[in-house]
Image (cartoon, rainbow, N blue to C red):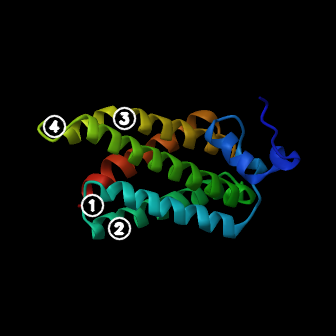
Amino acid sequence: MAINLPAGWESSTPKAFWNIFALEAGQGKLPVSTKLMGGCVAAYFVAQTALHLLEHGLVSSLMFGLGSAGLLAGLTAGVLELYKSREKTIQAITALAASGAVIALSSIILHFIFAVALPPPLPTQRLVGFLLFPIAIWNVFSFAWIYRHAAIRTIPAFALAATFVIVVYFIMATLIH
C-alpha cells in the first residue's frame, strides 16, 4: 500500500526539518522567521534542561539549559558575523536548536531504555554514559552539517561543532551541579 503525502509536503517546513535531521539538506529551505527560531531555541532549552534533570537538580538543570541555549545562539551569531554570513543566522540557529532538541530527546528516551535494561546494582550512570556516546558523535556531525551549510568551510565547521559539544556536554554539564 503506497503512502500518499500531500502535494505541498516537499516544500514544507516539516520536510525541511526532516532533511536537516537526516543530513540530506541544509537549512536553506527553512523560512527566515524569528518566531520559528524562538520556538526552536525554547524547545532546545526545555530538552537540554530535561536531559540534565535526569542526573542533577532543578536549579542546575535550568542553568545548564539556559547556558546551553545562550551559547548555541550567541556562538552561532558571532561566528556567522565573522564569516560575513549574517543573512543565514536565523536559519542556522533555527536548524541547530531544532536538531539539538531532537538529539536531546533521543538521548532522554535511550537513557530511560538503558536505565531499565541496566538495573541499579550495576554502575548504571557510567554504562549509560558510555552507551550514549554515539549520540554525542551524532550531535557533532549534525551541527557540523548545519554550520557547513551556513557558509563555514568543512574543517572549521567540524572544529566548531566538536568544540561546542565538548564544552556543553563534557565541561558545562560537569561544572554545573
Number of marks present in the image shown:
4
Percent position of residue 136, x then y: 42, 39
- Quarter of image, res 90: bottom right
Considering every residue shown, the one lying at the far top of the view is 1
Percent position of residue 114, x then y: 31, 37
Q: Which mark is residue 121?
A: none
- Quarter of image, res 3: top right
Marks 2 and 3: in contact by CB < 8 Å?
no
Which residue was labeled with disc 1? 176
In the image: residue 115, left or right of residue 149: left
- Relative to the observer, which residue lies in front, 4 or 64? 4
Instruction: Give the residue drawn at x 36%, y 68%.
Output: 62
Marks 1 and 3: in contact by CB < 8 Å?
no
Which residue was labeled with disc 2? 63
The amino acid beneath tag 1 is Ile
**Which class describes the residues within 10 Å of circle 1: few (<14), some (14-19), or many (20+)?**
some
Q: Foreground mark, 4 or 2?
A: 4
Percent position of residue 20, x then y: 66, 42
Percent position of residue 60, x then y: 28, 66
Mark 4 or mark 3, which has the lower sequence index? 4
Of helix, strand and loop, which one carries label 1?
A: loop
Which residue was labeled with disc 4? 123
The amino acid beneath tag 4 is Pro
Which residue was labeled with disc 3? 133
Mark 3 or mark 1, which has the lower sequence index? 3
Marks 1 and 2: in contact by CB < 8 Å?
yes
Of helix, strand and loop, which one carries label 2?
A: helix
Of helix, strand and loop, which one carries label 3?
A: helix
Vertical arrangement, residue 92 with respect to residue 20, above or below: below
Marks 1 and 4: in contact by CB < 8 Å?
no
